[in-house]
Amino acid sequence: MPGTPDSAEYLSFECPNCGGTTIEEIMIDVTVSTSIALIDSDGHIDYDMDQTNDGGEVYRFQCQTCGHYITTDGVQAPLNQPVSKIITDCDELAKWLLKQPYNQEKADDS
Ligand SMILES: [Zn+2]
């Protein structure tokens, strides 16, 4: 399949909490535009899947399965605690992933 990531070059993720392998990016202050397909007389709206996002900033990265968010020290603190350790930057996320044992071979390669 074209565009399939070569697993030798890409970093893996394993959630420290549940072992999930998918990271999701949570954004705030984003403007979302969605096309409306149908509106009935009761005001019920059917949306198209067509959606665009504009602006916004990364609020955190987290495990898609359990919502465990990724911090520089790996410690899960409540979200209202100091946020300086919550990773919000892709470079920082890559650096954090490179430090994880399951990515050590890739760290040695580079
Ligand atoms: Zn998880």
Image (spheres, rainbow, N blue to C red):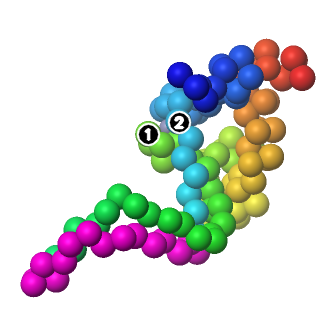
Q: Which residue is drawn at 81% across and 38% down?
A: 95
Q: Residue at x 10, y 83 (%)?
A: 42
Query: Looking at the image, is 32 positioned above or below residue 58?
Result: below
Which sits in the foreground, 63 or 31? 31
Cβ at disc 1 under 8 Å from ligand 1: yes
Find the magenta span and give its range.
29-43
In this view of the protein, can residue 33 be seen by the observer?
A: yes
The image shows residue 21 at horizontal and vertical percentages of: 53, 30
Q: Which amino acid does label 2 sit on?
A: Thr
In this view of the protein, can residue 78 be seen by the observer?
A: no
Query: As drawn, is 31 to the left or to the right of 101?
Result: left
Nearest-to-viewer mark from 1 and 2: 2
Which sits in the foreground, 20 or 46? 46
Which sits in the foreground, 34 or 63? 34
Circle on res. 65: 1
Q: What residue type is labelled 1?
A: Thr
The image shows residue 100 at horizontal and vertical percentages of: 73, 27
Q: Is 35 contained in the magenta span?
A: yes
Q: Point out the tag, 1 or 2, that comes first from the N-terminus.
A: 2
Circle on res. 31: none
User: Mark 1 near mark 2, Cβ–Cβ under 8 Å?
Assistant: yes
The image shows residue 10 at horizontal and vertical percentages of: 70, 27
Corner quadrant of residue 77: bottom right
Q: Name the residue under label 2.
A: 22
